[in-house]
Each structure stands twice: as C-alpha cells, then as structure tokens.
Amino acid sequence: MATVFMRWLERRPATYDRGIRLLTLGRLERLYRIIAASVQADHQVLEIGCGTGALTSLLAEVTDRVVAIDVSEDMLTVARQKLDEKELLGHVQLTRMDAMALEAAYSPGTFDMIVSSLALSELSSTEQEYVLRICRQLLAADGTLLILDEVAPAHAYARLLFGLIRGPLRLATWLLTRTTTNPLKNLAVKLRRSGFADKLLAAALGGTLCVYQGKPEVAAGFESVHEQIPRIGHDPNIASRLKDAWALFFRVLPPYPKFEPGLYAIGKPDSDSPVLVTGNFDLTVRRVVRDIEGELDAWLLVVNSSGINVWCAAGGGFLSAERVIGALKMSGIDEWHRGKRMVLPQLCANGVDGNVIRAQTGWAVNWGPVRARDIPTYLENGYTKTEAMRTVDFPVLDRLEMVSATLGLYGLMVLGPVLIFWRHLFWPILLALLGLSYFYALALPLIPGRDGLIKSLPLAFIALAGMVVFTWLTGPMDPLQLFRRGVGMVALSVFVAAELQGMSPLMRGEQANWGWEALIAVMLSVTYWLLPRIMGWSA
Amino acid sequence: MAGSPRLRELLLEHWHLARTLRRLEIVFDPERCVGLFECFEVCPVDCWHQNREQNKVEFIGARRCIACNACVLQCSVEAIELKVR
C-alpha cells in the first residue's frame, strides 16, 4: 500500500498543469507567447523538458520542425494527446531523453532556437551549467536560447521576502497538486560562463519568473565545471545526524535528503586512483565515504539520482546510463584520468546499462560489490568479488533499519484512522503495531514459507493472544468484543507482514501487497459496519 | 484520496503489475551466450553459474530470481529475456 501511495504522490502529469498555473499565479501564458513570438516558420526548434506540452503546442503552431524532449514517459503521453487534439502532432518529434544525453544525440549547430520552460530548475546547479554548455554547442551561430524559469532574487533581503511569499504558496501547491519547482540561482552568470550574451527579455511576479535570452558569443568549451575538486570525509555533525534520523523513520517520504552531484576526492587520490560511482541519496554518500575513508584514496563520482538510493533509482528510471555519462563529462575527469575505469554499484545494474557507458565514453565499467564496506577488499583483489560480495542478504540490523524506515509511513496510515474512530484503543494498537513490526523483523528467517499469507500467520496468532490478554486485563470478556478485536488484530498483523515483506530485497513481494490490504479493508468494514447493522448489535 | 479516479486507475494498474511480476521468469538462450559473465557479476541473488569449460553461464536460480532485470539489461548479446509465464 505504501508504494501505491507513493506512486500516487509522484504521479504528476494529471495535476502538473494545474499546479504550475497555481505556482505562477497564471502568468505563464503571457511569457509562453513572448517565446513563441520569436520563433520563425523555418526554424529548427529544440524544447528541453516539454512537460505536458503547453509551450510545445504554441511552438508547433509556428514551425513544423520542433524536437521536444522530456525524461518522463507519463508527461510525454499527456503532451502527445494535447498535440494530437490540436492536430499539431506532425510538427513535433517527441522523444524521451535526458538533457544530459543531448550532446551525443545531435550534432553541433543543429538548432536555430532552443527553449526550456521550468525544466532547468529540476536539475542540480552543476547540471544546469552543463546543459547550458550543451545548448551552446547545439545552437547555430545566429541561434537563440530562451530560458523561462523561476529565478531567485540576487539581493539577500529580496530573497527573504521572496521566500516568505513563496513558502506558503509552494506548500499549498504541493499539497493540492504535488508539483513544485526550485528557483534558479545566478542564471545570468551561468549563461555568460557557458558562452552566451545574456539579456532579460521579460519578467513577471516581481521579477521572479523570467524569460532570459542567450545569444552565442564565444565558442563553448567543455572544460571542467569544477575548477577545484572538493574533498569529502566522514565527519558526522548535528545536521548529518538529523538527516540520518529523518532517513531512518521517514525514508519513504519525499523530500529525500539530496547530496550535490559532482566529483569528490576521498583521501588524496591522483589521476590513477579508482573512480567509484554512486547516487546522490544523502545517506548513501555518507555511508560510502564512511566505509572508504582511511582505507584507500579514491574519486567519488556522485550522480544525480534525484536523491533516491541506487537500487530504487535505477529501477524507477531516475539513475540511468545517461545520468552517469553526464556526470562523468561534467566532472571533467574524462579528460585527465589515466585508468579510465569506473566502479558502478552492483545494485544499479537493473537500470544503468553498462554497455551504453562503455560504448559512449570508452571507459571500462566494473560492477562493484553490493555493500560499500567491501569496496576496499574488492579493489585489492583486482576488481573481483567473492560470492558474499555479490549476493544480497537481509541481516537483522538491516531488517530493523528497514522496519523503522517504513514504520514512519505505514504507522501513520494505521494510526490516523485509529485516532479518529477508536481513540481509546490508540495506545494498545500503537504498542501492537510496534511489537508486531519489530518481532517480525527479528523473526523473519525463522518463520516458514517463502512469502505470502503463510508467513504472516504466526504473527496473527501472537497478536490474537496479546489481544485476549489485553481484553482480560482491562474488563469483562465480551464475546462480541473479542470477535471484533480479533478481526482487527488479524487484519493488523497481515497488514504489517505485507508491508514488511514488501521491503525485503529478496522477495518480489512489494507489488503484490495491496491485494491483501483490500481484503483487510473488506474484513474490517464487514465486522465493524455491515455485521452490526444486519444483526442489530449496538456498538 | 479515495474518490480520485486517478487513484482507482493506479490501484488497478498496480494489481495488474503485481500479477505480472509474480509470473515473470527468465528465458535463457545458451546458444547466444558468449561467456561475458556480466549476468553473473550483477545478479544480486546468485542465479547464474559460470561454466568455465564451455565458456557459458547456466541459469540455476528459478526459485530465487526476483525479476530485477539486471542480467537482461547487461547482456550485450541478448541471450536473456524476462517473459510472462
């Protein structure tokens, strides 16, 4: 159930347009028209991040040579429908592509105009600069770049005011539509550094929603975006401990704590030192650093995985070969590293195509161990893994951690209704939930069965016994009450088992959970709503 | 949340996915295998056995397989597929 809920939160196209309209207080349309007005009929136009195609259809009315890319298949589906309704689909080539992959996909000087609306703000700061450099390369010498995005004011007081006004609006918009944006910082500077002459074309909302124009000025270089490679070390402080605590109990809820993507030095690496790749989930990066530091000198290439752990990010399309290649190029390491060999986490092999990286960069790709703490031994043994390093297990500490991580969310899902309808049972149910969850986490390997209903039955027996003792201690044993509480406890234990099996890396469980949860809902409503009505019982 | 038609669609889609996921299985064509052993390297549940003499892999983990798709993606000779049973 937790997954369905999460996917519902992340499902944006349906509400995206509404959210964006709300966020920008409806000023977007006028700016779109300004952009469309500078397109000519014979222009070859590239739109980066077309979203649901609002700007795309305006562009397609002027020219029939539009290429529109977006990373989200869902967004592209909506855009395709929208363009089809307006009979403009023939004018647009819709492609699912990461902006990072543009450089490899098109030859220099291909486009007369490149536009991007509210897309750059979804990238990290270094990625924005990298994409601007790609734009500079893909633009014809007399071409134009138009960026429409939210811009944070340069002045500190103005930024504070901006934050005060935007804060509530952003929260409201997120709650209503699950859409939000992060304002761009120093866009004009980034444009200039990427070889553009910048000009502010239009602005709305007190100068926070802007259209910037970039005209190619000097030849764009692809020299490294980082002039100095920052060193990171394992240095726990209050902020990192707070983030760990958040990650421990609410890991499944966004915002996932993110680490700024880029190249980092661990220890004192040189141009022959191993290159380790990881995603930018904050906890992942800190754990990798903790396990490596002091053991060896290495380069750590943190790839933007939208702040999600590598396994889920690769499975969900957030961590891909394009992202890794982009990070490699952006960091500049491609130009000076001698070994040209990277170690990818084995657990991103479900979404990062190693062959694409090999073909497009010429780097050797090795699949590292499952756990970061095995990396030093793995490298010592000449990039070879033992069976234990290759295999995922689910030891008791991990099980306890995962229970805590998911308990935050599913605890809320269970305790919310309890607090509203059965307030007097809140504490016993909270205790039952905690007890069942942690007992299950501890006893998982001892319980027979692969996965499914069977594995949750022992839990149900324990829960029933606990409930009988509780009822006996607190009052007279009313058979009707016992029956109802019994149904409730069985439902609770099946729910807990289903959620916990879903987190196990060794089962296909997660996807199959909610069937049981539907069953639980039926059981509960029959016992607490339908039966009393039919039999004429009083509550 | 409950009244949203989108959520209902999503639940149905999820239900369908769940059924499909349970019925996914690895289909391996040994004829195509050229012994790169990438599948062996990336499998998190140790489903592949390296047969050094024949320079091929053998699929030994039908019951363990979690259908993560890693071997399918990394196999550059397209010898592995995930199919619905």
Image (spheres, coloured by chain):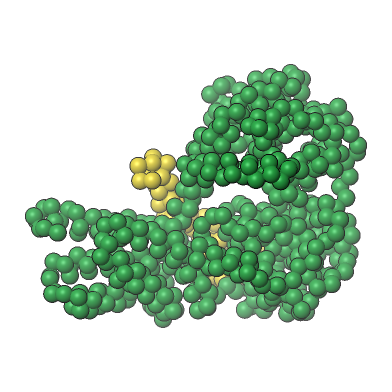
Q: Position of residue A14 (x, y in %)?
A: 49, 38
Q: Is residue A434 left or right of residue A139?
A: left
Q: Residue furthest front?
A: A157
The count of marks equals 0
Vertical order, A97 against A495 (above or below): above
Q: Which tint was used for chain A? A: green
Front-most of residues A165 and A208 = A165
Q: Position of residue A167 (x, y in %)?
A: 56, 45
Q: Residue furthest left?
A: A536
Q: Is residue A126 left or right of residue B10?
A: right
Can residue B65 be seen here? no
Identified at 63% across, 24% down, the residue is A30
Front-most of residues A90 and A114 = A114
Q: Position of residue A423 (x, y in %)?
A: 27, 62
Q: Indicate the quadrant containing the N terminus of chain A: top left, top right, bottom left or bottom right.
A: bottom left
Identified at 23% across, 55% down, the residue is A525
Front-most of residues A439 and A404 = A404
Quadrant in the picture for residue A297 = bottom right
Q: Position of residue A156 (x, y in %)?
A: 71, 46
Quadrant in the picture for residue A243 = bottom right
Identified at 72% across, 60% down, the residue is A302
Q: Which tint was used for chain B? A: yellow
Vertical order, B10 against A521 (above or below): above
Identified at 71% across, 31% down, the residue is A211
Front-most of residues A35 and A81 = A35
Can residue A418 be seen here? yes
Q: Indicate the quadrant containing the C terminus of chain A: top left, top right, bottom left or bottom right.
A: bottom left
